[in-house]
């Protein structure tokens, strides 16, 4: 049992701050698919920090070597350029499966590739998890709720998704990925042969922002921040009354790790319940970067969800998790990173 050791403060105190050798938590071998991306690279930082060995598998479609460059000399770290649509053989204890473009601009760029990544890529990672007995965590999305008819969204809500729209490669892709994950968890119900089952976890992630986001990925927070810094108008799509709930990346990473280490499968909503319209977000960006920044209205994209806000009661109760960083605190940290990358060091930052 890899959780057998105590990192509990009172225990640490009782042994004078030092955990005796035999009682230390065994270091794990962890695979992070999509680990060179925005969320993945922050997760990798935390896993290495706590002493685990990490393998990143990434095809660098939206990820960058610069996001993990600061670990390249670490003997506990390895990057493999590989597309999860192809099978792979590895030996690890845990798999965080993040590989998939997350920005609508990126996932719509090659929708067939996006759905293959979600379906075939997830199938391969589940096949891998099953073969080696690894614990598997899927990073699903709030997009599985589509244009929700229930507000805020609870995990028991089945969603309102257009199966043939331009966002379907992503939202239907993730829905299928969730289905595959649960089917691998339950195993085949055959009388003669019952294949081993997988230990799985499902996170439904709501809009997340922070340092290392792709500067020109078209997502609203990265667009507004880059636009304000470059003295360009903030592009508000539609009437700007649609809402989203924005979570700072460190809160998400903590939630993902709690989910992986805990005893519950999920799905769990991981998001910050603070809800903002796009006009309100523009105001926060103006206050943070440039009160003179202009707003320019643009036509909205097809099937854009009107509102989105997580109900996080389940994660609070069962994982003991809730986000800590409000938008007005997290945004300045992202601005520092964007400023550096836009005006200075282009290779990326280690923030
Ligand atoms: P990202 O685009 O920065 O990272 C995705 C990573 O996956 C990139 O490094 C990319 O190169 C890699 N990748 C893509 N397709 C691949 C493939 N076929 N094989 C191997 N690698 C591949 O996105 P992110 O924001 O870090 O998102 C990470 C995960 O979290 C995604 O699965 C995304 O769907 C999910 N998610 C993110 C958000 C968010 O707001 N950031 C919200 C909901 C869900
Ligand atoms: N797979 C993989 N690595 C492994 C084991 C499986 O990439 O270590 C892939 C395998 O190629 C297959 C998928 O995972 O395409 C599903 O594997 P599983 O064994 O569940 O199904 P099967 O191979 O019997 O279809
Ligand atoms: N949006 C906007 N201006 C932009 C980019 C996006 O007003 O420059 C809006 C978009 O229409 C959507 C919301 O911001 O209503 C969130 O879009 P994003 O692409 O960031 O994420 P998602 O739609 O996946 O939640």
Image (tube, grey):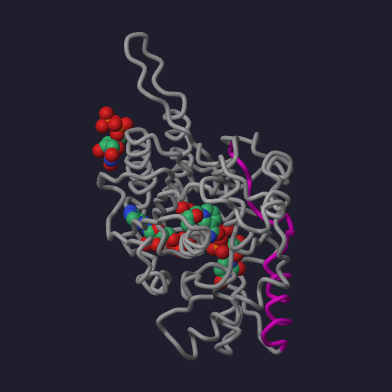
Q: Residue furthest top?
A: 191
25 vs 15, left or right, is left
Q: Position of residue 9 (x, y in %)?
A: 70, 53
Relative to the observer, which residue lies in front, 20 or 174? 20
Looking at the image, in which quadrant does ligand 2 appear? top left
Does 330 lie within the magenta span? no
Asked if 146 appears above or below 241 in the picture, the reply is above
316 vs 3, left or right, is right
226 vs 197, left or right, is right
Q: Report the magenta residues as a range.
A: 266-291
In the figure, residue 241 lies in which quadrant? bottom right
Residue 213 appears in the rendering: yes
Q: Position of residue 90 (x, y in %)?
A: 29, 46
Mark count: 0
In the figure, residue 79 lies in which quadrant? bottom left
Q: Position of residue 77 (x, y in %)?
A: 37, 62
Q: Position of residue 140 (x, y in %)?
A: 51, 46
Relative to the observer, which residue lies in front, 212 or 311? 212
Instruction: Residue at 72% x, 46% y: name it.
Output: 152
Quick one: quadrant of the C terminus?
A: bottom right
Does 270 lie within the magenta span? yes
69 vs 310, left or right, is left
Instruction: Residue at 73% x, 54% y: name it.
Output: 273
Asked if 134 appears above or below 306 in the picture, the reply is above
Instruction: Residue at 32% x, 14% y: name it.
Output: 193
Residue 104 appears in the rendering: no
């Amino acid at each position: 049992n890899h959780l057998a050791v105590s990192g509990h403060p009172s225990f640490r105190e009782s042994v004078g701050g030092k955990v005796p050798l035999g009682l230390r938590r065994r270091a794990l071998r962890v695979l992070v698919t999509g680990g060179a991306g925005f969320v993945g690279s922050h997760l990798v930082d935390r896993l290495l920090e706590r002493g685990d060995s990490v393998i990143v598998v990434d095809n660098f479609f939206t990820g960058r070597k610069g996001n993990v460059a600061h670990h390249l000399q670490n003997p506990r770290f390895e990057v493999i350029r590989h597309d999860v649509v192809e099978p792979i053989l590895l030996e690890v204890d845990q798999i965080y499966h993040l590989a998939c473009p997350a920005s609508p601009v990126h996932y719509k760029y090659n929708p067939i590739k996006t759905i293959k990544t979600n379906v075939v890529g997830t199938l391969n990672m589940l096949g891998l998890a099953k073969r080696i007995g690894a614990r598997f965590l899927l990073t699903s999305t709030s997009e599985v709720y589509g244009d929700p008819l229930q507000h805020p969204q609870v995990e028991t809500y089945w969603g309102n998704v257009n199966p043939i729209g331009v966002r379907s490669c992503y939202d239907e892709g993730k829905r299928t990925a969730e289905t595959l994950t649960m089917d691998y968890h339950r195993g085949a119900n055959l009388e003669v042969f019952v294949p081993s089952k997988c230990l799985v976890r499902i996170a439904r992630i709501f809009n997340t922002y922070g340092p290392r986001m792709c500067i020109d990925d078209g997502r609203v927070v990265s667009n507004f921040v880059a636009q304000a810094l470059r003295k360009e108008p903030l592009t508000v799509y539609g009437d700007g009354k649609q809402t989203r709930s924005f979570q700072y990346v460190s809160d998400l990473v903590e939630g993902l790790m709690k989910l992986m280490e805990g005893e519950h499968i999920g799905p769990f909503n991981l998001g910050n319940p603070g809800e903002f319209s796009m006009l309100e977000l523009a105001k926060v960006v103006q206050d943070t970067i440039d009160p003179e920044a202009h707003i320019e209205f643009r036509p909205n994209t097809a099937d854009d969800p009107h509102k989105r806000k997580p109900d996080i009661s389940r994660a609070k109760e069962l994982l003991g998790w809730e986000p800590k960083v409000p938008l007005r605190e997290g945004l300045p940290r992202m601005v520092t990173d964007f400023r550096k990358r836009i005006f200075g060091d282009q290779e990326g930052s280690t923030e």
